[in-house]
Amino acid sequence: MPISRREFLRLGSLTAVAASVTSCSVVSRYVSQEELPETLPVPTAVSPEIAGSTIPADGFPTTGINRVHRLLNRAGYGPRPGDLARVSEMSFETYLEEQLNPDNIEDTAADLIVRNLN
């Protein structure tokens, strides 16, 4: 007797549910609340002096990463021409405040482009 598509899908979904329920019970046996420590260690902040004075582990080369270049890569879409010099003259906090305050950004060129699209 051939089974219909609906019966096949129902059987497949029940099989998937059964497999997931049994696998969850196996995992829950291995991980339990009693194995967790009473208090978890809290990470502490590292001062910039200590962070800058660390040496690389054996086998790893020194990177010599420019901090301004890294900031521009992490906080934006990478440096544009002139950004490295401009950000080097200001503090990181000033640059981040500038990026996070869009009301002070000069955007008349973008306004003209949008106006021409309408």
Image: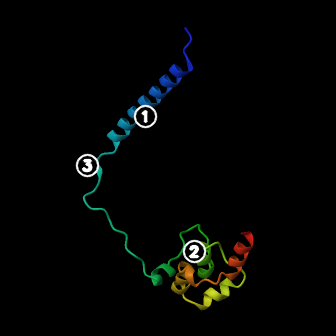
Secondary structure type for disc 2: helix
Identify the disc placed on residue 20.
1
Residue at the spot x=43%, y=81% of the render? 47
Q: What is the number of the mark on residue 34?
A: 3
Q: Secondary structure at mark 1?
A: helix
- Amino acid at the residue labelled 3: Glu
The answer to whether 80 appears left or right of 4 in the picture is right
CA gap, disc 2 and disc 1 = 41 Å
Q: What residue is shown at x 24% (from left), y 58% (from top)?
A: 38
Which image quadrant for residue 95? bottom right
- Badge 1 crowding class, 10 Å Cα cut-off, few under 14, some 14 to 19, many 20 or more, is few
Name of the residue lying farthest toward the bottom:
89
Viewer-nearest of labels 3 and 2? 2
Inter-mark Cα distance, 1 to 3: 24 Å
Residue 24 pos. (x, y %): 38, 37
Precedes in sequence: disc 3 or disc 2: 3
Q: Residues within 10 Å of mark 2 (few under 14, many from 20)?
A: few
Location of residue 45 by image quarter: bottom left
Instruction: Name the residue type under label 2.
Output: Ala
Query: If you read the primary sequence from the N terminus, does the residue marked by circle 1 or circle 3 appear first?
Result: 1
Q: Which residue is mark 2?
A: 75
Residue at left offset 56%, top offset 81%: 103
Q: Quadrant of the N terminus?
A: top right
Secondary element at tag 3: helix
Q: How is the image coloured?
A: rainbow
Point 51% across, 84% down: residue: 93
On the rendered structure, is 22 left or right of 83? left
In the image, residue 61 above or below residue 83: above
